[in-house]
Image: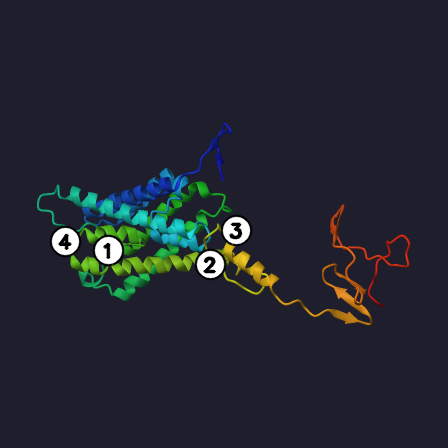
Amino acid sequence: MTEVAADATPVAPPTTAQKLAAELIGTFVLVFIGCGAAVYTGVDIVATGLAFGLAIVMMAYAFGRVSGGHFNPAVSLGAALAGRIPWLEAALYAAAQVVGGLVGALALWIVLHGFDGYKSSVDGIGANSFGDTNGNGFAWWAAFLLELVLTAVFVMVILAVTDERNDTTAFAPLVIGLTLSAIHFVAIPATGTSVNPARSIGPGIFTFDGDHILQLWLFILAPLVGAVVSGFVYPLVFGRGKEPVAGSGLAFRAAQPAVAVPGLGAPNAFEQQWNQQAYAQQAPEQPIIQDGWQWDPATQQWIPAQQQPAVPPQPSAQGWAPPVQADPGDPSGQTQVRPPQ
């Protein structure tokens, strides 16, 4: 849908290239500022948490109108499941976000070498870790559960505050940023806080440390599982402000005519056509005949057995009305044939 400016001049919607550029830049800034704060402050919990949260606020207000301001593959996954964006767009967003995270980590890695004697595998680059790698012995299953739950909370908040039925959507970037900060306050001592595969991949790789790289699976998988939870739960529990966009959600082919499971999308164009063809090819039902009368499903009335419907449904002033079956004994031709008493 084409936007209209205040002076009624049509505004062209963002192109796919512009959306991907917005996601790439936003993720770059998130990683560069958030992980940079972690390194420069010695992982001060408040400073690092606020840095990540404020980076999201800045980028969401800057690019939210272009791409929606995801900057996180988990958010894009949750939005696609909830029917907000098509799957293809979610996949492209995720690719752009990972690239943005990699470029952000590379830029930070280069800048950090301005410190005399800096070594990424020793001094860190804001990478996520658990167990012996981060020195606190936090078990892998606990780290997985923590990242899953916090990502589910994060995506749930995003789906809620960006719901078009919510009259406070103008404050959505601020709420999302504060939520991310609160999440960091909880998880920094345990895992360094990910809730975002793109945020973890770049710093994890540019530590050039085998242990951090081997642990990346957890910080990719756990946030995606958390996003799936919220992507299902939010529309099922709270409904939708509008129908799912084409190519999003999950559609189920049910009994004819096709009925979509509430909250899980709708049949796409191909499935609708397939359902219509299958319905048309069904064998005709046996006629209903009683006491010399036959029910005609096309005209929705009783007619004498063996007699074909006289006319198809005719339009009336109030819309489409049932046809009138003429009685051969009535000269006016207006007598309606009715079922036997």
Q: Could you tell which of marks 1 and 4 lies nearer the N-terminus?
A: 4
Q: Is residue 71 visible?
A: yes
Crowd tier of the residue under label 2, counting other residues whose Cα lies within 10 Å: few below 14, some 14–19, many 20 or above: some
**Mark 2 and mark 1: Cα distance apart in space:** 32 Å
> Tag 1's secondary structure?
loop
5, above or below 188, in the image: above
- State the residue in front, 284 or 32: 284
Q: Which residue is mark 3?
A: 243
Q: Is residue 203 left or right of residue 292?
A: left
Dots 4 and 2: beta carbons under 8 Å? no
Q: Which residue is mark 2?
A: 250
31, above or below 62, in the image: below
Looking at the rendered structure, the number of numbered marks drawn on it comes to 4
Q: Which residue is mark 4?
A: 121
Q: Given the image, on which type of amino acid does mark 1 rest?
A: Asn
Residue at the (16%, 43%) spot, across then down: 110
